[in-house]
Amino acid sequence: MVPSNVLSVAMLLAEPSTPAVAEQGVTAEPPAAEPASVEPVRFEPAPMMAEPAPMIEPMPEDTPPNTRWRGGPYLTLGLAPMATMDVHAAHHPGLRYDLETGLAWRRGRMRVYVGPDLHLLQYFGRKKVGFGVDGVATVSLRHVYARAGLGTSVGMPASADVRDTRPMVGGLVGGGLVGRLDDVEGRVGVDYDVRVDTSGRVAQTVLLTLRMTFGP
C-alpha cells in the first residue's frame, strides 16, 4: 500500500499549475493589441479659378486707326511725256510738268486727294511754254488709282501748227499703278486729256504720267 501522503503529493504534481492571479479569483485579460498605424489624410487646396479681367469699354478716341479717316495736306510732283493731237490727226510731242497740292484723307489702304494741279506744257519745236490749272480728285486703293479733273489751259495747239494756240477748257481722266512707303506714294499711269478752245477746235492729249506724292 502506498502511503496517503505520497498519493497527495502525486496528485498535486499531476494538477496543472495555475497562476497566482487565478488562485485569487481574478481572470487574466489577454494583452491589448497595438493599434494599426493610420496614415494621416492630406488635404490639398482646391485650384483657384482665375478671375476674368474686367471689360474696358473703348472711348471714342480709342477707335482703331484703320477704321477712321486721317487727313492733312499733301504735295505731288509729276513729269509726263505727252502727245497732243488735233481733229486732223496732227500730233505734237512734248513734256508736261505738274505741281499739285491740297488736302488728303487716309483710312486703311485707301487714300483720297483733292486739290488744284498747276502744270506747264513744253512742246518740242517751239520755245513758248503753255500752262494751265485743273481741279483734280484722286482715289487710290491698294495698288491702283484713278483720277479726274476739270480746268483751263493756255498754249495747247489745236491745229497742225504748234504755234497756233488759244485758251482752252476741258478735263482729264486717268489711272494706273501705285507703290507706297509710309507717307510717300509713287504713281505710274496714263491720262487722257480733252480740251476745246474758244473757236470750237478740239485738242486731245495722251500722257504717260510719273508722279510722287508726299502726305498722309
Image (tube, helix red, strand yellow):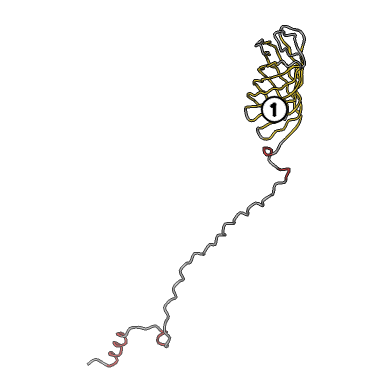
Quadrant housing the C terminus: top right
Toward the viewer: 53 or 1?
53
Q: Residue at x 42, y 82 (%)?
A: 28
**Residue at the front extreme?**
199
Q: Secondary structure at mark 1?
A: strand
Toward the viewer: 49 or 167?
167
Q: Residue at x 40, y 85 (%)?
A: 22
Toward the viewer: 61 or 165?
165
Residue 215: quarter of image: top right
Please, is residue 93 above or below residue 23 in the view?
above
Percent of width and height locating residue 154:
77, 15
Three-letter code for the amino acid on which mark 1 is drawn: Thr
Toward the viewer: 147 or 18?
147
Percent of width and height locating residue 202:
70, 16
Q: Residue at x 67, y 51 (%)?
A: 55
Residue annotated with mark 1? 138
Badge count:
1
Q: Is residue 101 left or right of residue 24?
A: right
Percent of width and height locating residue 204:
68, 16
Q: Is residue 52 left or right of residue 42?
A: right
Rate crowding at label 1 as few (under 14), some (14 to 19) or many (20 or more) other CA atoms within 10 Å.
Answer: some
Quadrant housing the N terminus: bottom left
**Residue at the left extreme?**
1
Residue 163: quarter of image: top right
Q: Residue at x 39, y 83 (%)?
A: 19
Percent of width and height locating residue 120:
75, 16
